[in-house]
Image (tube, rainbow, N blue to C red):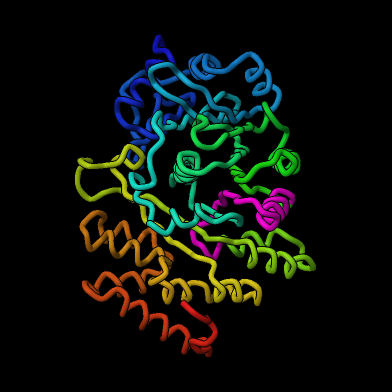
Amino acid sequence: MSIEMQELLQLVVDRAASDLHLKAGEPPIIRAAGKLTRISLPILTDDDTKRLIFSCLSEEQRRFAEQNMELDCGFGVEGLGRFRVNVYRDRGSWAAALRVVLSRMPSMEELGLAPVCKEFLTKPRGLILVTGPTGSGKSTTLASMINAINEKQDKHILTIEDPIEFLHHNKFSIISQREVGSDTKSFANALRSGLREDPDVILVGEMRDLETIHLALTAAETGHLVFSTIHTSSAPQSVDRIIDVFPPDQQQQIRIMLAHSLVGVVSQTLLPKTEGEAGDSPVTAGRVMAMEILINNPAVANLIREAKTSQIYTAMQMGSSLGMQTLEASLAKLVREGLVSHKEAILKSSRPEDLEQLIGNQGGRGKTEARSSYSEKSEKGYGSSSFGRF
């Protein structure tokens, strides 16, 4: 096997792929437009995979990988861009998954983010969550939001990432980027220290544990605008995930903190486009984004405090005039515009019956959602007064 890592990465970039997989017993595999494809190259041996993977690691990173049998890091290749890599052991052999990090920071408009997302950035404090499954573009969305603040607001922005993906440069703001492992020992340590570093905006790459979540909520309550991610597939599920991390005797206190500090939740997923790649953004080549948006208004805050998160979906339906949006409404719009297939939309939906109804109603999405909302409320036995003003 004579191919070098840089040649493989060049091929990944040339094919507009998002990921490269290396493992013994297989040729190199790329993911493009969400689909895995084996490259027409010889099958990798144990020695091939180790040589390729270790060629892009520093001596310190190699020692860490050998001691811990796994490693998360990022690296750059001049002329190609940056890559995020996870190194791991697979049945006694070395393996790796490499993710392409865009060389150019995409704008919020290029990503197709809803206008209300820009309004989130004007808030002086609070918690903004970007959620979705792995590979749905959460890091790119967050980087775009941070860049938008950097370009127009005079802020000190602190990011805590594992690893650092997008490299930000000081513009109107100043940005401090800390990487878990090389600049700090953990998200929690960096957050605890960060509160004494005079930040206005804090990005927490992922809220993984109870301590990190509690510190992020505290930071949001004490005058900081906090951005973070959770691996959940919907906005209501994100609220539940945060609360459920804590012991039962603390959950009511966390509900109150979250109801007070949450700004909004953007839950996104990527779907393959029905036709071609013309006009694709550099982020979603061959794919298009569907997005669920929750805005924390007084009605939603009340549902969170009272542990009625099952009713948040209905609140999003009724709050469409404020910029809220269910995933089903977003999927239905994409199907009606011919951007994604009916089948793909159904596969991504957790409420296929609601989606079918919305797709069938070509011109009256709002009316359909209102009827669905009214029906759901009637079944559960609560009236419109439960939701306050929208």
Expressed as whole percent of the image width and height from the top left, the position of residue 390 reads 46, 77
Q: Residue at x 57, y 74 (%)?
A: 298
Which of 324 and 328 lies nearest the eye of the viewer?
A: 324
Image height check: is 56 above or below 354?
Answer: above
Expressed as whole percent of the image width and height from the top left, the position of residue 29 reads 39, 29
Whether residue 25 sits left or right of residue 249 in the image: it is left
Q: How many marks?
A: 0
Which of 363 and 8 lies nearest the eye of the viewer?
A: 363
Task: Specify the quadrant of the image occupied by residue 33.
Answer: top left
Q: Is residue 135 visible?
A: no
Please tell me whether residue 72 belongs to the stretch shown in magenta. Answer: no
Which of 58 and 160 lies nearest the eye of the viewer?
A: 160
Q: Which residue is drawn at 31% across and 80% down?
A: 367
Q: Give the range drawn in magenta.
A: 211-237
Q: Can residue 386 be seen in this view?
A: yes
Image height check: is 284 above or below 234?
Answer: above
Whether residue 359 sits left or right of residue 23 in the image: it is left
Task: Specify the quadrant of the image occupied by residue 61.
Answer: top right
Q: In which quarter of the image is the N terminus?
A: top left
Q: Residue at x 57, y 42 (%)?
A: 155
Expressed as whole percent of the image width and height from the top left, the position of residue 199 reads 65, 42
Please tell me whether residue 220 belongs to the stretch shown in magenta. Answer: yes
Which of 99 and 169 lies nearest the eye of the viewer?
A: 169
- Residue farthest to the top? 2
